[in-house]
Amino acid sequence: MKTRLIAITATAAVLASFQPIMFAAEEEEIPKEVVLAAYKKNCAACHGMDGKGETRMGKKAGTLDYTDIKVIEEIKKKKPEVVFKHIKEGMEVDGKEKMKPFDKKLKDPEIKALIKHILTAFLPKEK
Ligand code: HEC
């Protein structure tokens, strides 16, 4: 009984240590709560936990309301790699910096997952 428990614990530890590799390989593998935590840490200061961008920093930076389907449609019209670049390398509009680059803080699959989160999570749920 005891050896079995140890074996299970050992397996769990090995699996846990493999997780970062899995994240790098497959963006879908990033669990929702990890994406949410990364959003909270890196993005919510401007875009808000509700996606409305009505935070002090967001208002200053000029964030748009991501609960508005029209705003989301405009972002979706852009090429995914352009939007991705805006997060990874920073975004400027009319020579004014809107977002700083996140390439030092986030890995590519994390950025992709965060963009997906922004494009889907804040819209009013369809009935
Ligand atoms: C300093 C404030 C600030 C922070 C922090 C910030 N953003 Fe932004 N973001 C902006 C502003 C301003 C815009 C331009 C207006 C808009 O689309 O809301 C923008 C635009 C975007 C866009 C649309 C890009 C496009 O090409 O139209 C996405 C997607 C986005 N942000 C995602 C993120 C993610 C993901 C994070 C966290 C990793 C993040 N932002 C952090 C201010 C910020």
Image (spheres, rainbow, N blue to C red):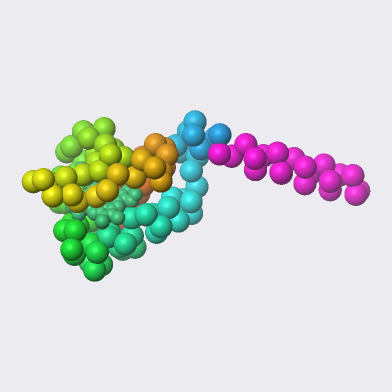
Left or right of 59? Residue 87 is: right
| Residue 17 colored in magenta in the image | yes
Q: Residue at x 55, y 39 (%)?
A: 20
Q: What percent of the width, then of the height, locates residue 123?
A: 27, 56
Seen from this angle, which residue lies furthest bottom?
56
Position of residue 63 relative to residue 72, above or below, is below
Q: Residue at x 30, y 44 (%)?
A: 101
Which residues are drawn in magenta?
Answer: 1-20
Q: Residue at x 49, y 34 (%)?
A: 24
Q: What percent of the width, then of the height, locates residue 59?
A: 18, 64
| Residue 64 colored in magenta in the image | no
Left or right of 30? Residue 71 is: left
Q: What percent of the width, then of the height, locates residue 12?
A: 71, 44
Q: Nearer the viewer, residue 47 or 8?
A: 47
Q: What percent of the width, then of the height, locates residue 120?
A: 31, 49
Q: In which image quadrant can residue 16 be found? A: top right
Quadrant of the rendering where the C terminus is positioned: bottom left
Residue 10 in sight? yes
Position of residue 32 relative to residue 83, above or below, is below
Residue 68 in sight? no
Q: Nearer the viewer, residue 89 or 76?
A: 89
Q: Residue at x 18, y 63 (%)?
A: 60
Count of labels shown? 0
Q: Main secondary structure of the magenta part?
A: helix
Q: In which image quadrant can residue 116 be found? A: top left
Left or right of 74? Residue 21 is: right
